[in-house]
Image (cartoon, helix red, strand yellow):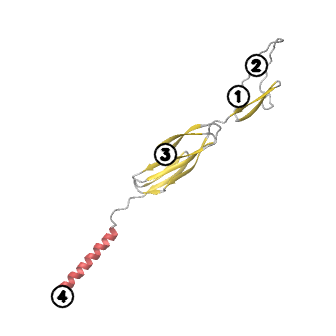
Amino acid sequence: DINGVKEADETVTVAAGDSQEVSFSVTKEDAGIYSVAVAELTGSFTVVAPAAFSVSDLSLQPAQVKPGEAVTISASVANTGGEPGSYTVVLKIDGVKEAEKTVTIAAGESLDVSFSVTKEEADTYTVTVDGLSGSFTVAPAKPLVNWPVLGGIIGGVIVVGLLIFFLLRRRRA
């Protein structure tokens, strides 16, 4: 019996004074501790859940950068199973695989996985890590010259120059 339920039955004939080994093989899918009884003997066995992983807490910092600046993309990977295992975290940007990292995590533990990404082209990029998504923006680089201010200064200098020119011309006349 396993947990009080008859799983297998075998009839054996044994001569007086002899012994014979009897083996049973049982497969259980569900994790847990199982009680076993064979005649008046009892025992137990444990089925451990395999490693199972979940990914959460996607973070992109900072959300906006200048061309060439790094964005740190991180997520938490948890092993919710009963055994240690390895898991490969895949980072996609705009649907294209950018990077991957394989981590080994003990049963019941979690680990933060981080990637550093740099883009040169101004755009908004969509990030996906195992079904979680977010985005970051590379802002266009600001021009080195502020043309409206420079134009105002040049215009002001021209006006002042013309005023001085006309005032000096008037005095001579």
Which of the two labelled residues, at mark 2 and mark 1, occupies the earlier sequence position?
2
Q: Quadrant of residue 144?
A: bottom left
Residue carrying label 4: 171
For this view, does 55 lie left or right of residue 159? right
Question: Where is residue 114 drawn, in percent x and y?
Answer: 51, 47
Mark 2 vs mark 1, CA separation in Å: 17 Å
The amino acid sitting under disc 1 is: Thr
The secondary element bearing badge 2 is classed as: loop
Can you tell which mark lies on residue 27?
1
The amino acid sitting under disc 4 is: Arg
Mark 2 vs mark 4, CA separation in Å: 128 Å
Q: Quadrant of residue 18?
A: top right
In front: mark 3 or mark 2?
A: 2
Please, which residue is most extreme toward the front here? 17
Residue carrying label 3: 92
The secondary element bearing badge 3 is classed as: strand
- Label 4 Cα crowd, 10 Å radius (few <14 / some 14-19 / many 20+): few
Q: Quadrant of residue 106?
A: top right
Mark 4 vs mark 1, CA separation in Å: 113 Å
Which of the two labelled residues, at mark 2 and mark 4, occupies the earlier sequence position?
2
- Label 3 Cα crowd, 10 Å radius (few <14 / some 14-19 / many 20+): some
The secondary element bearing badge 4 is classed as: helix
Please say if 167 is above or below 34: below
